[in-house]
Amino acid sequence: MAAKPRVLLVDDNDDILSFLKDDLEEHYEIFTAYDGKEALSVMAENCIHLVVSDIMMPVMDGYALCQQLKADMEYCHIPLILLTAKDTLQSKIQGLEFGADAYVEKPFSPEFLQVQIANLLASRQKIRQYFASSPLLYLNSEIRDKTDEAFLVKLEHTIQQHLQEERLDVEQLAGFMCMSRPTLYRKIKALSDLTPNELINLVRLKKAAELLASGRYKIYEVATWVGYSSQTQFGRNFHKYFGMSPSEYRLSLT
């Protein structure tokens, strides 16, 4: 059975937290926090897939939480829904300016919130699946968050620089990115649904697809260029990700 997505609920009202938890826990693993500062502590210890936060809270309000998450490379990919009793246009604009992915007014329909959560998670999953399956889709082409895009541009550039190194792994990549291995792992997994080693391999294969599409290189030359010492292994991995062999892919372009 697949693990439930992890949703963090942030509100200083016990009744609202209990209501939301009861309504959502059938489909999600629920975490709770009473303010933005506590929410950050929860997120530091757990892999959270989506945040639902009230705006008006002590210590750190929802706006500040949203702003901090969306400015942090480790967390900016996580969808965030703001809940508020304010119904002014300015409050909605402010929430969206801070990077909120959706805005829900109190009182709200539980079904409406459920749909918002499901749609945001499904959108993320669709991006990850499309990214993993398309041979010529670049890392940042489906990402809309600017911080995520900057991270992926740097990540792709780093992998491309070391593409011919057969032994490139997550430990080396984390060092090149000036990040801890766990942080890099969580970030890559969240954005692409791949492990860092799978992502390294996929970047190799996407570059291979680009070289094959040019028609200027033989398959064994492409395999060597992207860090494979074995053409057989290269062909097997190419077929695994893209559903066709390198030669079949080349023929499909003619």
Image (spheres, grey):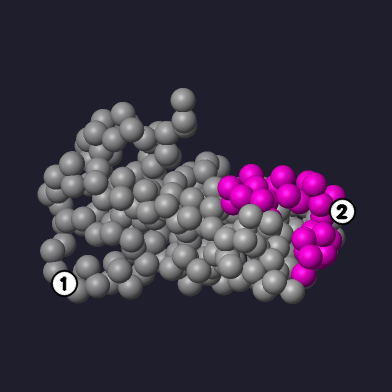
The percent coordinates of residue 104 (x first, y second) are: 21, 55
Identify residue type, mark 1.
Leu
The residue labelled by disc 2 is 229
Which residue reaches farthest top?
Answer: 1
Ranked by sequence position, the earlier of labels 1 and 2 is 1
Distance (Cα) linking label 1 and label 2: 59 Å
Q: Nearer the viewer, residue 74 or 155?
A: 155
User: Toward which corner of the image does residue 5 lie, by quadrant?
Assistant: top left
**Type of residue at label 2?**
Ser
Residue 35 visible, this angle: no
- Closer to the camera, 35 or 108? 108
Q: Judge from the rendering whether residue 83 lies leftward or rightward of residue 30; answer left or right.
A: left
Q: What kind of secondary structure does the magenta stretch mostly adopt?
A: helix
Quarter assignment of residue 222: bottom right
Residue 89 numbered tag: 1
Total numbered badges shown on the rendered structure: 2
Which contiguous range is marked in magenta? Answer: 217-246
Can you see residue 80? yes
Dot 1 alpha-carbon crowd within 10 angstroms: few under 14, some 14 to 19, many 20 or more:
few
Residue 237 in magenta?
A: yes
Q: Secondary structure at mark 2?
A: loop
Lateral position of residue 104 relative to residue 238, left or right: left
Relative to residue 232, is residue 92 drawn left or right?
A: left
Whether the residues at callouts 1 and 2 have beta carbons within 8 Å, the answer is no
- Mark 2 packing: few (<14 Cα in 10 Å), some, or many (20+)? some
Which residue is at the front of the view, 176 or 63?
176
Asked which secondary structure carries label 1, the reply is helix
Residue sitting at x 64%, y 62%: 250
